[in-house]
Image (spheres, helix red, strand yellow):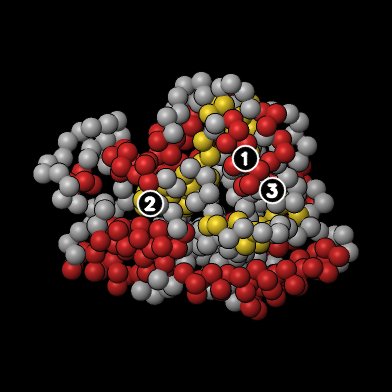
């Protein structure tokens, strides 16, 4: 069986973990490897500050706290996303307002955001699906005109850019994921990117259980204490050590995944040319990270048959999100603004093919052959 995903492993992870345990004697949060990861992210993206977190979910919760999201505030986002995008704001008592997506990128339709804005709107949360950027110029213009916070859900977007800017650095805050299904992994984990230096100190305080402990360890104060409401968003340094091994090989992992992505595209393009499937669209100005390779079947029935056929041929292919507005909690906590033209229809067509670091060329060719055989 060709698995849908194999967590990335470069071979030096356990060496770094052993260093954290046996040499550094530091396995709790904000140890040497955590600082190395933060510095790597800052250098790579150009953000003012990066803070490793226990998950992308927690990074988004931290962004919600920093944005002072309160009960009754409305947060505009796509319905085609993971539950964490909404959960972070529902926990604050806010209302997710879902708008339709674009069928080409599966990203929020930037032309439908303005109509969803009310006097209660506090933030826009664009989700960069498959590591392909939303139209951030339009979104940032809306945010400026209506005085809204922008929190980028860049869970899938590390190493991707929009017009030369790293995803996660364009809005007020950006959120990365290092879950085992992502391009770089620490098992469970994430990071908050902070664009404006003025927000860094409060972010450190909230992340450290509401204390000014970070300033204490930098020698800026002689003791630390409780100064704000907060929680614990620090991953253990063992996890950070595991991640750092992969960040050291970030370009190698990127290039390996991109080779597989490009080969899929080349081999399956004839099917698209015949009108049998739809391949991913990468708009001008967007550089993606080969986070996933998906194809779109004609409809739900055809997709179900395709996934079953691939499974029979030892290939694990999967579909993705059930739109949040159709889920029980989505109905309870949020609402869909406007008409659902593409969100449900396009989500029912999409099939994700295996893509991971170390996927072999012959495996990509075999998978593509079987997809072609299905349509033949």
Q: Where 216 sits versus 293, above or below?
A: above
Q: Quadrant of the C terminus?
A: bottom right
- Disc 3 or disc 1, which is closer to the eye? 1
Asked whether 17 or 38 is in front, the reply is: 38
The residue tagged 3 is: 106
Q: Is 117 on the left-hand or right-hand side of 63?
A: right
In the image as oriented, which residue stretches furthest toward the bottom? 362
The residue tagged 2 is: 49
- Disc 3 or disc 2, which is closer to the eye? 2
Q: Quadrant of the N terminus?
A: bottom right
Q: Where 245 sits versus 156, above or below?
A: below
The residue tagged 1 is: 141
Q: Residue at x 45, y 63 (%)?
A: 44
- Disc 1 or disc 2, which is closer to the eye? 1
Q: How many marks?
A: 3
Q: Can residue 321 be seen from the camera position used here?
A: no
Q: Residue at x 62, y 40 (%)?
A: 141
């Amino acid at each position: 069986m060709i698995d849908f995903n194999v967590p990335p492993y470069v071979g030096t992870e356990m060496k770094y973990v052993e260093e954290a345990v046996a040499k550094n004697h530091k396995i709790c949060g904000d140890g040497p490897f955590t600082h190395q990861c933060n510095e790597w992210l800052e250098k790579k993206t150009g953000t003012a500050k990066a803070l490793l977190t226990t998950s992308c979910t927690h990074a988004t919760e931290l962004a919600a706290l920093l944005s002072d999201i309160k009960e009754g505030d409305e947060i505009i986002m796509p319905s085609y996303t993971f539950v964490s995008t909404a959960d972070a704001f529902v926990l604050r008592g806010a209302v997710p307002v879902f708008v339709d997506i674009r069928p080409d990128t599966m990203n929020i339709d930037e032309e439908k955001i303005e109509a969803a804005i009310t006097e209660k709107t506090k933030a826009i949360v664009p989700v960069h699906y498959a590591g392909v950027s939303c139209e951030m110029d339009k979104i940032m213009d809306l945010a400026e005109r209506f005085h809204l916070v922008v929190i980028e859900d860049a869970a899938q977007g590390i190493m991707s850019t929009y017009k030369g800017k790293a995803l996660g650095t364009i809005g007020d805050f950006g959120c990365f994921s290092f879950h085992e299904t992502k391009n770089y992994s620490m098992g469970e984990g994430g990071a908050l990117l902070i664009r404006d230096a003025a927000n860094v100190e409060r972010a450190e305080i909230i992340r450290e259980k509401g204390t000014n402990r970070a300033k204490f360890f930098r020698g800026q104060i002689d003791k630390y204490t409780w100064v704000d409401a907060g929680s614990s968003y620090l991953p253990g340094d063992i996890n950070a050590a595991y991640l750092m091994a992969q960040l050291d090989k970030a370009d190698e992992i990127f290039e390996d995944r991109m080779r597989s992505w490009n080969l899929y595209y080349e081999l399956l393009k004839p099917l698209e040319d015949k009108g049998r499937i739809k391949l991913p669209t990468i708009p001008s100005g967007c550089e993606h990270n080969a986070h996933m390779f998906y194809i779109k079947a004609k409809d739900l029935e055809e997709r179900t048959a395709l996934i079953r056929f691939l499974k029979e041929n030892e290939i694990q292919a999967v579909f993705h999100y059930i739109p949040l507005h159709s889920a029980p909690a989505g109905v309870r906590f949020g609402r869909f603004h406007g008409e659902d033209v593409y969100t449900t229809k396009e989500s029912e067509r999409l099939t994700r093919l295996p893509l991971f670091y170390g996927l072999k060329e012959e495996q990509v060719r075999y998978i593509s052959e079987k997809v072609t055989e299905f349509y033949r």
